[in-house]
Image (cartoon, helix red, strand yellow):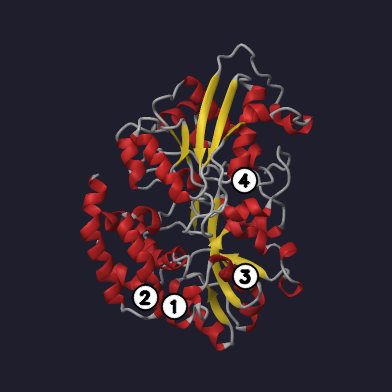
């Protein structure tokens, strides 16, 4: 792993903002973004005064002043404070210094993910697709790929051997079900269970490896006087993750793919078991008042020593480090990966949900040889660009810091085998909205497992066909 790099020290604000698909601060993660900034940033103009240390990774390369000019537009919902924005600035500067001084990039930040998505859809409809933009591998992305509006990056990646550069999980975050490469990873995050070591010890609980062991651990913790789990019901994707923990293990991503298309039912053996799992956790083991707890509240409840477990991604790693904890919590936080099926081999074998900050797609209209050259450079220098900011998506990449907790997570990341797809990305918008509300009611015990399953299936039947046919 590398330690030398380009940009500054690890920024807590950058890491915290890098949530889920990592586009600003969204209603699915931390609440609405308050920053408004749609003005382009010409990175070429910002290279003056760059220190010698900042370019020492240039490996003796010098840019060719005679190289033809290229100006690219990158529209992003990644805030200027996030590592994904900063690392792109780093990459562009390096590319200008080492490859093409006549290259420039206008980075246009659109605050708030819904506003960003609407902007992209407006530009696409007007035949003004940007050179680069952030794109999840959702149904809309598949449509853009099918229509030739964005580039399938497989040919470029095969041409330059770039698939071996990236770890499978972050690369897979930008890969469609059929293997087409929609987008390129920016960084790497995994989601884990953080746990309070003292509470586990006092309750005589060992790290659970199966669903049954997990429920048993919750019961022991509760009997010992501890709140087993802290979760945000306002950010309902957190509860949806518990649903996914079961559907994925028994049905891999195919269960969710088929459910979204109406080819699978939530009212099935797997779906009912997943719903029952959520309801048992919600009615017995989530903290009191979880339905009205927001993202920050759930995090603080755990790090403040009030709950034994909290499921969240490594974008919250800064808050788990000793320098951010009270004295009684220092050295008291560990983590474990997803529990698996109680008997036999799971169908879904990945042991953590992994993702990248909303990855980068490339518009087809202006995609040319210089774009390919930039992509090759990006892939081979992303570790340098993310150093001190985030976990790199590359094999043997850089770390945000060198604590023992960080290094342990990094070692698990090297065992990534692919991406677990998410309810809040794969479902049609109407069903996505419905399942987010109903899963909270399910966890509260306000509706039955059967009611939850039938409502999800009814929404898919009503909305999926028309949405996916658009």
Task: Check contact, mark 2 vs mark 1: CB within 8 A.
Answer: yes
Q: Which residue is mark 2?
A: 442
Q: Secondary structure at mark 4?
A: helix
- Taking the image as shown, residue 16 lies to the left or right of residue 126, namely right
Q: Which mark is residue 300?
A: 3
Q: Quadrant of residue 2?
A: top right
Between marks 2 and 1, how big is the CA–CA gap? 8 Å
- For disc 1, the marked residue is 282
Please provide percent x and percent y for residue 84.
58, 43
Which circle's residue, 2 or 1, is located before the other in the chain? 1
Q: How many marks?
A: 4
Instruction: Report the Cα–Cα distance between label 2 and label 3.
Output: 24 Å
- Position of residue 33 measured from the top left corner of the image (x, y, whole percent): 54, 54
Assign a secondary structure to mark 2. helix
Q: Which residue is mark 4?
A: 83
In the picture, measured across the screen, residue 469 lies left or right of residue 159, that is: left
Gap between marks 4 and 3 measured at Cα: 23 Å
User: Residue 109 has which mark?
Assistant: none
- Mark closest to the chain's N terminus, 4 or 1: 4
Between disc 3 and disc 1, the foreground one is 3
Q: Residues within 10 Å of mark 2 (few under 14, many from 20)?
A: many
Q: Residues within 10 Å of mark 3 (few under 14, many from 20)?
A: some
Res. 344 visible in picture: no
Q: Residue at x 50, y 69 (%)?
A: 232
Q: Residues within 10 Å of mark 1 (few under 14, many from 20)?
A: many
């Amino acid at each position: 792993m590398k330690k030398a790099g380009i940009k500054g020290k690890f920024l807590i604000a950058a890491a915290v903002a890098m949530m889920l698909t990592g586009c600003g601060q969204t209603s699915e993660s931390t609440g609405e973004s308050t920053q408004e900034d749609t003005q382009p940033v010409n990175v070429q103009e910002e290279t003056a005064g760059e220190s010698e240390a900042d370019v020492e990774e240039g490996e003796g390369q010098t840019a060719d002043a005679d190289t033809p000019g290229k100006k690219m537009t990158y529209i992003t919902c990644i805030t200027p404070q996030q590592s994904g924005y900063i690392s792109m600035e780093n990459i562009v500067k390096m590319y200008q210094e080492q490859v093409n001084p006549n290259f420039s990039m206008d980075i246009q930040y659109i605050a708030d993910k819904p506003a960003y998505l609407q902007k992209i859809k407006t530009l696409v409809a007007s035949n003004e697709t940007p050179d680069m933009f952030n794109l999840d591998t959702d149904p809309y992305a598949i449509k853009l790929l099918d229509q030739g509006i964005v580039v399938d990056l497989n040919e470029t990646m095969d041409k330059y051997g770039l698939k071996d550069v990236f770890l499978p999980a972050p690369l897979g975050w930008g890969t469609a079900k059929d293997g087409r490469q929609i987008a390129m990873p920016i960084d790497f995050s995994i989601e884990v269970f953080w746990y309070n070591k003292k509470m586990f010890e006092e309750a005589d609980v060992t790290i659970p490896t199966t669903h049954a062991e997990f429920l048993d651990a919750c019961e022991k913790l509760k009997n010992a006087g501890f709140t087993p789990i802290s979760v945000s019901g306002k950010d309902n994707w957190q509860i949806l993750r518990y649903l996914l923990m079961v559907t994925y293990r028994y049905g891999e991503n195919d269960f969710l793919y088929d459910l979204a298309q109406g080819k699978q039912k939530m009212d099935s053996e797997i779906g009912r078991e997943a719903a029952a799992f959520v309801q048992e956790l919600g009615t017995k083991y989530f903290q009191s008042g979880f339905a009205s707890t927001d993202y920050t509240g759930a995090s603080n409840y755990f790090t403040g020593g009030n709950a034994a477990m909290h499921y969240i991604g490594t974008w919250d790693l800064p808050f788990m480090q000793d320098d951010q904890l009270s004295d009684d919590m220092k050295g008291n936080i560990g983590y474990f990966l997803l529990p698996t099926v109680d008997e036999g081999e799971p169908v879904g074998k990945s042991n953590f949900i992994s993702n990248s900050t909303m990855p980068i797609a490339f518009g087809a209209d202006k995609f040319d040889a210089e774009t390919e050259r930039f992509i090759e450079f990006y892939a081979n220098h992303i570790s340098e660009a993310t150093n001190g900011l985030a976990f790199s998506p590359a094999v043997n990449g850089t770390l945000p810091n060198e604590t023992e907790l960080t290094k342990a997570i990094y070692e698990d990341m090297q065992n990534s085998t692919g991406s677990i797809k998410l309810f809040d990305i794969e479902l049609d918008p109407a069903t996505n909205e419905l399942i987010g509300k109903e899963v909270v009611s399910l966890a509260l015990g306000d509706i039955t497992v059967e009611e939850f399953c039938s409502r999800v299936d009814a929404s898919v039947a009503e909305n999926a066909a028309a949405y996916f046919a658009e």
